[in-house]
Image: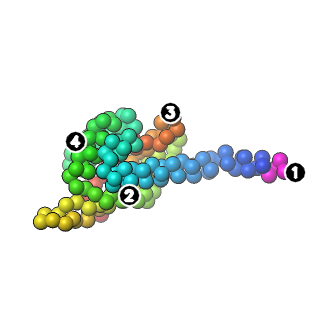
């Protein structure tokens, strides 16, 4: 009798619903790792969270291609004073080895005359699961304003 409940538990754990939940958790953990690395001032750690062939599409700027260039971009953003970045996922859709993450962002930037000014915006990230099973940011686009 004990083998039937264990078998049912095994089927539940291997179901697509259970796998989707673990993918959602992995993406949430990677998003949190991005926030922590950025807010700690570690551009190299932020860059490492992107796929090797990842790309940023920053507002008003040229596309940034590849992990090294992405690392340099975020290191520059850190140096410019963009701080206290907070990311909030509003919608996450996972399809196989890709996921679409839509959300809000906020942070602070240096204000003229000292202090800081709050900024906010929206983002879309396309995540890609690597051959190692890790989810990485693959395409990252955002804009400022509500």
User: How many numbered markers are drawn?
Assistant: 4
Q: Which residue is mark 1?
A: 1
Q: Nearer the viewer, mark 1 or mark 4?
A: 1
Looking at the rendered structure, which numbered label has been put on residue 62? 4
Question: Is residue 128 on the magenta stretch?
Answer: no
Which one is in front in this view, the residue at disc 2 or the one at disc 4?
Answer: 2
Residue 60 percent coordinates (x, y): 20, 49
User: Does residue 139 appear in this view?
Assistant: no
Horizontal side, residue 57 vs residue 130: left or right: left
Q: Position of residue 1 (x, y in %)?
A: 87, 51
Q: Is residue 29 visible?
A: yes
Disc 2 and disc 4: Cα gap in Å?
23 Å
For mark 4, give the secondary structure: loop
Mark 4, mark 3: which one is toward the viewer?
3
Q: Earlier in the sequence, mark 3 or mark 1?
A: 1
Does 128 appear above or below 9? above
Secondary structure state at the residue bearing disc 3:
loop
Say which residue appears at 21% left-offset and 65% top-offset: 116
CA separation, marks 3 and 2? 26 Å
The disc label shown at residue 131, or none: 3
Magenta part, dominant SS? helix
Q: Residues within 10 Å of mark 4 (few under 14, many from 20)?
A: few
- The image's mark for residue 87 is 2
């Amino acid at each position: 009798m004990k083998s039937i409940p264990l078998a049912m538990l095994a089927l539940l754990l291997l179901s697509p619903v259970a796998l989707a939940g673990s993918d959602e958790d992995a993406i949430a953990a990677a998003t949190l790792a991005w926030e922590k690395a950025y807010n700690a001032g570690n551009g190299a750690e932020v860059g490492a969270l992107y796929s090797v062939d990842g790309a940023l599409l920053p507002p008003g700027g040229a596309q940034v291609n590849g992990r090294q260039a992405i690392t340099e971009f975020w290191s520059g953003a850190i140096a410019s004073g963009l701080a206290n970045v907070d990311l909030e996922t509003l919608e996450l859709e996972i399809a196989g080895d890709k996921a679409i993450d839509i959300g809000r962002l906020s942070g602070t930037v240096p204000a003229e005359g000292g202090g800081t000014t709050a900024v906010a915006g929206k983002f879309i990230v396309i995540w890609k699961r690597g051959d190692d099973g890790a989810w990485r940011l693959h395409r990252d686009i955002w804009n400022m304003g509500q």
